[in-house]
Image (spheres, coloured by chain):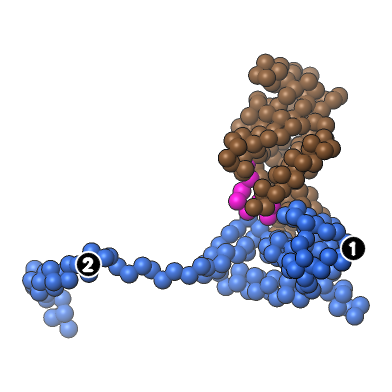
Chain colours: A brown, B blue
Amino acid sequence: MRLIWSSGYVELKLNKNPVEGFSAGLVDDDDIFKWEVMIYGPQDTPYEGGYFKAHLNFPKEYPQKPPKMIFMSPMWHPNIGEDGNVCISILHEPGDDKYGYETAAERWLPVHTVETILLSVISMLADPNDESPANVDAAKMWREEPAEFRRRITQCVRKSQDDL
Amino acid sequence: MGNCFKTPSTDDISLLRGHDNQDGAEQALGPPPPYQERVPVYHPSPNVSRLANQLSEEEQIKIAKRLGLISHLPVGVYDGSSKKGKECVICMNEFILGESLRFLPCMHTYHRDCIDDWLMRSFTCPSCMEPVDAALLSTYETN
């Protein structure tokens, strides 16, 4: 029930006050736990011009537990696995006390919405975090071969445009 | 002593068979259903879900302590007069008259069910991330 309300809320919010950078809807009208989102590559980044499709899979315990996000479009980014899985702190369940409160603040909170998740993902695209990369090759390339890194992303951008 | 193991090679089951035939109807019903009770699920760690009867002693103590701390947080019923927020930011529903609320020491208010579920996973306010146990202690000290 929560999700029906929350998703309704997010859609309402998106329509009323559209946030630039993405659009969202359901993969299948009968399943409110699976969302399909389209993220527009942020300006002034190698991803600019791309239309990247991703799925958000919500657990039954949402919003107490975070959804999983997976890019369906090919992506090249240190924090996106080669299988498309997005690895960012706000999609991780809160750590126990051993993680300390500061990092707990960066992890999943039940006040997050599709909107806050996607804003984090867009900021991740613009600003990769190579401390704990999901794609080690992409992280290494980002550090050591920036030109090749951009070239790989340009391929993803073109592919996403062709798939539209 | 040794006689205990000297059993005939084949058991005489004729009596059992006879018994079987007589109570065939009862047998068809199958064994009685297992004792069923809804066992609550707890989260000894944020990403671990376990039935109450499968918790280790250490986990039981941790959960009991957490339940005890949560029970010290004030509760109330929404009477429509709250100036601070009219919506539970966890479920995003507006508070309805008569609904049960929980007030955290940081002054954030949520539906009791929504926040209690979260506090069992992480003992922090989801809006301001203030650790609830530290806040509880400081309210005791100032009082």
Dominant SS in magenta:
loop
Percent x, y of residue A101: 79, 58
**Could you say which disc has been placed on residue B83 in the image?**
1
Q: Quadrant of residue B85?
A: bottom right
Q: Is residue A93 left or right of residue B134?
A: left
State the SS at label 1: loop
Q: Quadrant of residue A69?
A: top right
Asked if residue A134 lies in the magenta stretch, the reply is: no
Percent x, y of residue B138: 87, 73
Q: Is residue A20 left or right of residue A33?
A: right
Residue located 26% across and 65% down the image: B29
Percent x, y of residue B115: 73, 62
Percent x, y of residue B79: 81, 68
Observer-nearest of A7 and A61: A7
Q: Amino acid at mark 1?
A: Lys
Q: Is residue A1 visible?
A: yes
As drawn, the residue found furthest toward the right would be B142
In the image, which residues are magenta? Answer: A57-64
- The reply to whether label 2 and label 1 mark residues of one chain is yes
Q: Which residue is mark 2?
A: B27
The image shows residue A22, relative to residue B34, as above or below, that is above
As drawn, the residue found furthest toward the bottom would be B1
The image shows residue B76, relative to residue B121, as above or below, that is below
Residue located 61% across and 32% down the image: A83
**Image depth: mark 2 or mark 1 in front:** 1
